[in-house]
Amino acid sequence: MVLSTETPRESVTIDNWRSARDQAGDLHVDATGLYTTTGAAITLVKKAVPATYEHCARATGWADRIPFTALTVGARLCAYSTLDRYAVLQVESVPSPGGPRLIFYGRTWEHAG
């Protein structure tokens, strides 16, 4: 998935990884970081921990914003959608003056309950 700091209305929906030039999705970027809307949340997690539903369900430190300064290539985040789903994101590229795009891969799990 790609979000660009040059396209402020672009968003991504966690539940189905829909990307569109609207603000209906859960994930957005601005000049300083990745942020959520619609009640979704994100948190950084350790790279060494397996990316599983169970790990994301137990994660702590949920927030509605993570600054780009906290992200590096290979960083992992857990995300929680408003449809009660967890997801893991792996960062492939962080916005910089030479490239304004946040690129990541994502995987979403259904609620296990």
Image: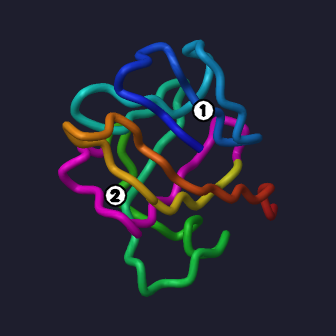
**Number of callouts in the render?**
2
6 lies left or right of 16: left
Three-letter amino acid code at the position of disc 2: Gly
Up-down: is 50 above or below 5?
below
Q: What stretch is highlighted in magenta?
A: 66-84
Residue at 31% of width from left, 26% of height from top? 30
Q: Position of residue 3 (x, y in %)?
A: 48, 34
Q: In which quarter of the image is residue 86?
A: bottom right
Three-letter amino acid code at the position of disc 1: Val
Please state which of the two labelled residues, at mark 2 or mark 1, is closer to the viewer.
1
Outermost residue toward the front? 98
Q: Residue 71 carries which label?
A: none
9 lies left or right of 63: right
10 Å crowding of disc 1: few (<14), some (14-19), many (20+): many
Which residue is nearer to you in this view: 8 or 80? 8
Residue at 50% of width from left, 62% of height from top? 90
Q: Residue under circle 1?
A: 12
Which residue is nearer to you in this view: 102 or 13? 102
58 lies left or right of 68: right
Residue at 43% of width from left, 86% of height from top? 48
Q: Where is residue 2 in the image (x, y as percent from the top left)?
A: 53, 39
Is 67 part of what is drawn in magenta? yes
Spatial CA distance of label 2 from label 1 is 21 Å
Q: Position of residue 61 (x, y in %)?
A: 34, 58
Quarter containing the C terminus: bottom right
Residue at 70% of width from left, 50% of height from top? 85
Which residue is nearer to you in this view: 44 or 113? 44
10 Å crowding of disc 2: few (<14), some (14-19), many (20+): few
Q: Residue under circle 2?
A: 61
